[in-house]
Image (tube, grey):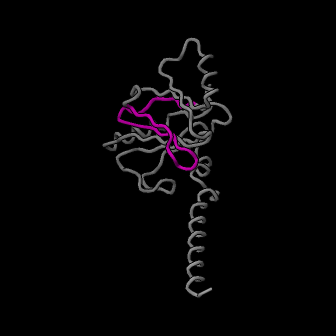
Amino acid sequence: MSVARALAIAILLAGVIHIIAILALPSLAPATAYARLATLAPDGGPVILARKGPLAPDLDPSFVHALCPFDASNGPVAIRGRMPGSFWFLSLVDQSGRPSESLSSRTMDLGDIDLVIAGEGEIDRLRSAETPPVAGRLYLTPATAKGIILFRAFAESDREREQARLALQGLSCGQPT
């Protein structure tokens, strides 16, 4: 075997190993965003993010951001409360960071939010148990049982920022009552 051929094989093998290692890192990391957030989140409430912080650096300064971890493997999760009066949206993000569902103030009433996250069978059971059906309640089935709900509320001024922060802080994220 020539030296050039052995060198080419070694470089090819090193490249393949390098690519495999890079692709495996996210699944091997013990401190995922979900795991870190689960330790920071108050019971039943969202975490309001600083404009620049360790959980999510480089956030859009025009929005107030909040995160709420959810785990629908132990039953449904309800998100309830009064949303900010400005434009807002929320996204369901799985543990690996991929968004699966999203809603905005344009698709819902600007006031209250009543959202239930659960598996398909669980949603059918909940809907059939509601007599009469709850008006305005939305049901979503996440891509994975565990994930994060990302809230973003537009705030043009400091006064609007404070109002949005208070509204997002007032949301409940947890088991339905």
Quarter of the rendering occupied by the N terminus: bottom right
**Residue at 47% across / 28% down in the picture?**
113
Foreground of the two, 20 or 135: 20
Name the quarter where the C terminus is drawn. top right
The answer to whether residue 87 is left or right of residue 139 is left
The single residue placed furthest to the left in the displayed view is 156
Q: Residue furthest right?
A: 74
The magenta stretch spans residue 130:
no
Q: Measuring from the top left, give residue 86's x and y in whole percent.
A: 35, 34
Which is the main secondary structure of the residues drawn in magenta? strand
Q: Residue furthest front?
A: 1
Foreground pick, 177 / 101:
101
Q: Position of residue 95 (x, y in %)?
A: 58, 47
- With 51 as the anchor, is 17 left or right in this view? right
Q: Looking at the image, which residue sits at the far bottom? A: 3
Residue under the image location 57 percent in, 39 percent down: 143
- Above or below 95: residue 72: above
Start-end of magenta stretch: 78-105
Residue 23's image quarter?
bottom right
Residue 79 lies in magenta, yes or no? yes
For the image shown, how many numbered marks are present on the structure? 0
Residue 102 percent coordinates (x, y):
46, 37
Q: Residue at x 63, y 35 (%)?
A: 72
In this picture, is 112 found above or below 151? Answer: above
User: Which x, y percent locates residue 119?
Assistant: 62, 31
